[in-house]
Image: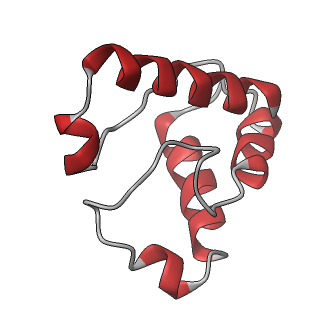
Amino acid sequence: MTTPGMVTKACADCAMKLPMETLRIPHDNRTFPGEGTIDYAPIVQQLKRLRYDGAISLEIWNSELHKSDPEAAVKRGAESLRHLEGLL
């Protein structure tokens, strides 16, 4: 059984391998997975190794996206989730 602690450690291990300049990106400038420069494949692969079968959610930390058309934002979010799903 995958525990929350195992998932936290997996994500922390992957994050520690990211360049510091990537981790310092201001929260207000974040994009959806698949749109930016972070390679999510190692994170997804680690979750697969742990047999994680829980929820995946998106956080919208971008003021421009908050101002955009909600339907367009939902479509971009769905595309992003499909991108992550394609890494499984």
Q: What is the x, y in percent for residue 23?
A: 46, 75
Please give the count of numbered marks on the rendered protein.
0
Q: Is residue 77 left or right of residue 88?
A: left
Examine the image and state in which quarter residue 1 appears.
Answer: top right
Corner quadrant of residue 42: bottom right
Residue farthest along the bottom direction in this orientation: 20
Residue at 69%, 50% (x, y): give it.
40
Q: Height in image: 18 above or below 66?
A: below
Q: From the viewer's perspective, is 13 left or right of 51?
A: left
| Position in image of residue 67 (x %, y %) | 17, 37
- Say if 49 sits above or below 31 in the image: above
Closer to the camera, 16 or 79? 79
Residue positioned 63% across, 63% down in the render: 37
User: What coloring was used for the rendering?
Assistant: secondary structure
**Eyeballing the image, is 1 above or below 42?**
above
- Left or right of 30? Residue 63 is left
Res 43 visible: yes
Q: Which residue sits at x=63%, y=29%?
A: 2
The quarter of the image holding the C terminus is top right
Residue drawn at 60 percent across, 24 percent down = 79
Residue 59 location (% of width, % of height) = 34, 37
Q: Is residue 41 left or right of residue 34?
A: right
Residue 85's spot in the image, x, y percent? 73, 24
Residue 88 appears in view: no
